[in-house]
Image (spheres, grey):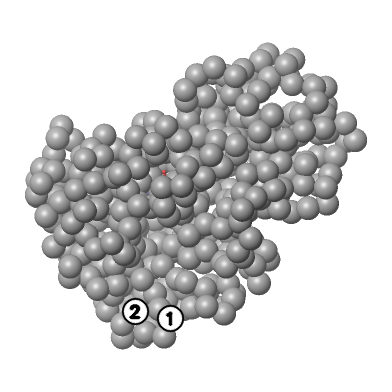
Amino acid sequence: MKIVNIEVNEILDSRGEKTLEVVLTDENYNKASSQIPKGKSTGSREAVSLGYQKAKENLKEKILPEVLNKEFNTITELDNFLLNLDGTKNKANLGGDLTLGVSISFARLLAQKNKKELWEILREEFFQDENNSTPPRIFANMINGGEHANNNLAFQEYIVVAETKENVKKTKESLLKFYNALNEKFKKEIGSEKISLGDEAGFCVNLKNSEEPFFILEKMIKEDFSESNFKIATDIAANSFYKDGKYIIDDKEFDEPSLVKYYTTLFKKIELFLSIEDPFYENNPESFEKLKNLLDNNKIIVGDDLTTTNLNEIEKFKKSINGIIIKANQIGSLTETALAINTAKNYDIKTIISHRSGETDDCFLIHIAKASNAYGVKIGPPQRERILKYDELIRIYD
Ligand code: PGA
Ligand code: ZN
């Protein structure tokens, strides 16, 4: 297939920040586009986002002269071409936002040409061994803290995890019921004027301390949602409260060993606890490993800022984790995202395909999840702009 044009448009994400839409045209004048989400609590090893102005310049000066009218038959061919053209470790030359946009739009053109869904094209090229079609577990954060909320909670996400038993529509309905019940509880106990929403549509409230949300979620699940089989997860996003070798939680200072102890004690108290993401600073893989070895085998230690969807980091840190967050814009191409997923799977690391706090209308993450038969998707609660990801799950699974 030949690309005859690439355009970028400046659009806004769900936080109202600028991001990219990338539109590709093929030799038959078919068009396909993609929109790139944007993170706020980012890992330092993530691919660089250069934004619209730079994307426009890079397209004109560096990409279009090299790419136009060349034949690319697979996503891998195009991505590897761009990877070489970029020549850096973190897409600092071309911008990971732009390269990912080109990659996804190209995959969509291939899908159109073959009259297939994006997920089918991805499965054929990267995940041939997958034939299971069980919906992924949904990680829906209900309460926000950390950098995603303006409140007193140190941890970024307090998550309810739902497994689909009947169909995704039913799962969405029970998560929505939970969300509304939590809203009612906060209105009654805290007052509606003191409730706002965090960046990913979870509730932003001030509570007694950073542990209290876990107990609130567990109590509600046990008392009112016992049929639903919900579990509890968290994204600690510890980068945000780490400084000079110390972690500050609720005005208390922790070093590595005392934080390991804090987590093991906390999670002994929460029966429904399933997984913990980024419990330590991104350059402390030893502490991840220590915690992993102390918790039961069925608990999941998830890397996000630690691993940044990067094959090399996964190789380095594979002993530290048994779960991983996959975000295509952390690495900047579908090919490298698929490589990260397949590497993780080789090491029995569970994959959770994730949104970003600044989201767009684009639901490519759901297609990556379906193509690769992911363990989970992290998509927020069924509220506001996050609903789109639920609708796409329902469309392609139910
Ligand atoms: P981000 O946060 O999209 O703001 O980086 C999400 C996460 O840390 O998982
Ligand atoms: Zn995270």
Give SS at disc 1.
helix
Query: Closer to the camera, 398 or 192?
Result: 398
Q: Which residue is mark 2?
A: 221
Q: Are marks 2 and 1 in contact (CB under 8 Å)?
A: yes
Residue 73 in sight from this viewpoint: yes
Pointer 1: residues within 10 angstroms few (<14), some, or many (20+)?
some
- Seen as rendered, the residue at the extreme right is 28
Residue 54 in sight from this viewpoint: no
Residue depicted at x 59% and y 24%: 83
Location of residue 209 in the rendering, given as x and y in whole percent from the top left corner: 17, 61
Q: Earlier in the sequence, mark 2 or mark 1?
A: 2
Residue depicted at x 42% and y 32%: 312
Quadrant into which the N terminus falls: top right
Cβ of mark 1 under 8 A from ligand 1? no
Location of residue 269 in the rendering, given as x and y in whole percent from the top left corner: 17, 70
- Name the residue type under label 1: Ser
Cβ of mark 2 under 8 A from ligand 1? no
Give SS at disc 2.
helix
Is 306 displayed left or right of 111 in the figure?
A: left
Q: Which residue is mark 1?
A: 228
Residue depicted at x 81% and y 39%: 31
Is 368 displayed left or right of 90 in the figure?
A: right
Residue depicted at x 37% and y 84%: 226
| The quadrant where residue 170 appears | bottom right
Q: Eyeballing the image, is 380 above or below 113?
A: below
Q: Eyeballing the image, is 220 above or below 246?
A: below
Query: Closer to the camera, 299 or 329?
Result: 299
- Name the residue type under label 2: Ile
Quadrant into which the C terminus falls: bottom right
